[in-house]
Image: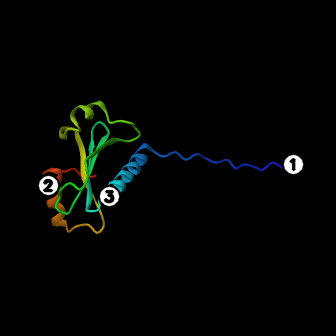
Amino acid sequence: MKQKSQKNKKKKTVSPEIMAKTNEMGMIEGILEGSPDAIGVAVVRLECGCKKMAAIDKNGDPASKVIIYRDAAENVCDKCKEDNGDFSRVLESFIHWTEPEPPAHRKKTIEMKVLGSQPTTH
């Protein structure tokens, strides 16, 4: 009997940064899918690695519950359990807009309402 030759297959490793962005986009898409009135998702990345997200509507009001999670973990960190992801620990915050995006002046107004006067960009 002839044995089938097996090609050496290299295992592709995905960097933790790419995996985190992929997981984050999956969460954003899930939030948008469950929020028909949403025009975007506010994303807040915390210094501990946890993330808070919520859909927002055309007025900058919540269009979903706030979700807090940590990539590749069953639970959020102990600090977030304690203070619910306090704003003083925010590393980065932004809004992931749906297409078509609102006009620039409208986006700025919503960002101020949702993220405050000093949002960080990604």
- Amino acid type, mark 2: Lys
Q: Cβ–Cβ below 8 Å for labels 1 and 2?
A: no
* Pointer 3 or 1: first along the chain: 1
Depth check: give the residue in front, 69 or 8: 69
Q: Measuring 29% from the left and 30% from the top, which residue is drawn there? A: 78
Amino acid at the residue labelled 1: Met
Q: Nearer the viewer, residue 17 or 106?
A: 106
Compute the Cα span from label 1 to label 2: 72 Å
Q: Residues within 10 Å of mark 2 (few under 14, many from 20)?
A: few
Residue 55 against residue 74 in the figure, above or below: below
x and y, in percent, of residue 110 in the image: 17, 59
Q: Compare marks 2 and 3 and give the one earlier in the sequence.
A: 3
**Crowding near the residue tagged with mark 1, few <14, some 14–19, many ≥20 C-alpha atoms within 10 Å:** few
Amino acid type at image mark 3? Leu
Residue indicated by mark 2? 113
> Does residue 82 sit above or below 87 in this rendering?
above
Quadrant in which residue 84 is drawn: top left
Q: Which residue is mark 3?
A: 32
Percent x, y of residue 83? 21, 34
Q: Mark 3: give few (<14), some (14-19) or many (20+) Cα within 10 Å.
A: many
Closer to us: mark 3 or mark 1? 3
Asked whether the beta carbons under mark 3 and mark 1 sit within 8 Å of each other, the answer is no
- Could you tell which of marks 1 and 2 lies nearer the N-terminus? 1
Q: Which residue is mark 1?
A: 1
